[in-house]
Amino acid sequence: MNNKVSILVVDDEPIVCDSCKKILTDKGFTAETALNGKEALKKFKQGDFDIVIVDLKMPGIDGMEVLQSVKKSKPEVDVVMITGYGTIPTAVEAMKLGAADYVPKPFTPVELSKIISQVVEKRSILAREKALKGKGAILLDVHKRPPKVAYHPELVWVKDIKIEEALDENFLNEVRSTPGGERVIDCMQCGTCSGSCPLAYRMDYTPREINAMVRAGLRDEVLSSNSIWTCSSCYLCTVRCPREIKITDIMYVLKNIAMKDKRFLKKAKAPLLSKYFVNIVNRYGRNHELELTLRFFLRANPKAMLKHSFMGLQLFLRKRFTLFPKRIKNIKQLRTMVKKAEALGGF
Amino acid sequence: MKYTYYPGCSLETSSKSYSDSALAVSELLGVELIELEDWNCCGATVYLSYEELISFTLCARNLALAEKYDRDIAVPCSSCYTSLKKTSSYIQENAELRDKISQALQTANLKYKGKVEIKHLLEVYVNDVGLDGIKSSVKRELKGLKVAPYYGCQIVRPAHGFDDPENPTSLDKLTEALGATPVYYPNKTSCCGSSLVATNEELAFRMQRDLLLCAAQNGAEVIITVCPLCHMALDAYQKKVGKMYGFNFKIPVLHFTQLMGLAFGVSSKKLGIKTGLVPLNKALSVYI
């Protein structure tokens, strides 16, 4: 990768120029040198450089002027300032004017290489972001919260910018092709949904983040997050969204997609409840609360069954539980329809 | 006034008193509720999480069966209400979905043209019967009874149009029509978390705590609900919620039709008043 990066080194001391050139070419960069500002700007104009390393203090056109000229003509070029003793405040000023970094003199080959490598890495991230944005995606900084920790203001979230395998363009289309999912693209990231959600504080990603992540194609992160299973379906986000995006329905779509891939269901209990519920409704045509409760708790949380047994008994004594299910008369008709809908394969 | 009655699964068992009281009250108001023959589960939030198309198809079967009669559907459960409403509007809005649902219905020799109007029972009483009609059926005004009118979420959201999605007033007005006093209840459309109670109890209990605390602090002597799931969340779990958070909640929770029944002079046995898990308090016992 480094051999594609072309660097211009500018310093009035030939020894600095030469040693920098050697360090950089050893690292695989293409490097050229200039001994003063005038020569530097001439070479810069003629050549195609990605990075300029320039000494701040030079006779004639100094480092600051070189920086300003470079940034004015090619803002995408990164400029790294070489600073001597006593020029740190000027270096700070240079940073404000757009310098990418500075390297204080005297520096070792390792120090120079490190700074240049950082600049190169930043450039490649920006280039990839630009390419992705060109494809219509919104990129966001994904803040990964420590697992199993509730919202805690003192905790610092680890910033994890995920770009490389980010884009699954099909994910956005998958969501957009479903009823309610059409308008996810209209999200302007105002955060009204997250501010309204009574459960956002316990979600891995807030509804606003989920919208952006769907658009960015962060499929695995969205589908494995607890956000989709934490949504209680109160529709407050939906009625408040100024762009009329049906966020609750998007959550349903995401649940549906996650349901089809077991990878995403490891931690959540809600999919298990859905599975048993679907099984019961497909068999009887109606829900049988006792069977659902027993099957779910036996599998998901047997302790909770003991904990709630007294409540269950009280409900039973008040005839609020029936032992036997009620089956609809035309269950065959219902099953035929379910089968057909299944065969049609969702949306 | 005749309506096709879609009770939903909860009203058959865990909230039978809701159905009993709704039928008793409707009769007194001249509303005939004719149960939809062989109705099936609406799918609720749980089936919808599994597979939307099948879930919508389940609702479409109910709508197709109901379309044979020239009547609106009256639904007492907010979750069923939202499921049916949502299916109905998506069938109209989304051609691809409409087509797939039609294909599924066809396999069962059913057809849905999209003509059924779906109404929540509260909507039927407040809008179709009217507050005057309700007032004139009151035999014993519930004078001084402080009521927290709890709407929950799915009766008003996503915008069904019959009342404001965030600050509805129909249940407050109905409470007043019965002679009772609706207390200030800013949490009236906050979610009760019932869809999470089995899978994430702690989250659900916290939501229920807020609802109970708000009602208690505003002096409510009874909470009334318009959804069997909200009723279950606030009544059956009330003691456990209090225990978890260190409150001794003792607020009876009634289906709104039970409160109407008390004002209409229906016997408390017929209304199933004592099927709640929270014991009745003095303020309510006066009317029993």
Image (tube, coloured by chain):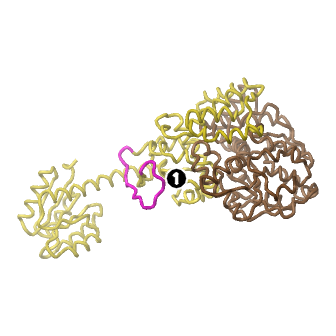
Chain colours: A yellow, B brown
Q: Where does label 1 land, which residue?
A: A202
Residue at position x 37%, y 48% in the image? A163
What predominant SS class does the magenta segment belong to? loop
> Picture quarter containing residue A336?
top right
Q: Which residue is at the front of the view, B87 or B234? A: B234
Say what amino acid the circle numbered 1 marks: Arg
Residue A159 lies in the magenta-colored region: yes
Left or right for B116, reference A269: right
Quadrant in which the C terminus of chain A is drawn: top right
Residue B235 in sight here: yes
Q: Position of residue A86 (x, y in %)?
A: 16, 76
B29 sits left or right of A79 in the view:
right
Residue B219 pos. (x, y %): 74, 64
* Residue under the image location 9 percent in, 69 percent down: A12
Which residue reaches farthest left?
A15
Task: Give the residues drawn in magenta, as a range.
Answer: A146-165
Label 1 secondary element = helix
Q: Residue at x 21, y 64 (%)?
A: A80
Q: Dot 1, how many residues are within 10 Å of its Cα: few (below 14), some (14-19), or many (20+)?
A: some
Residue B111 x, y percent position in the rendering? 76, 32
Q: Nearer the viewer, residue A159 or A46?
A: A159
Residue A300: name its quadrant: top right
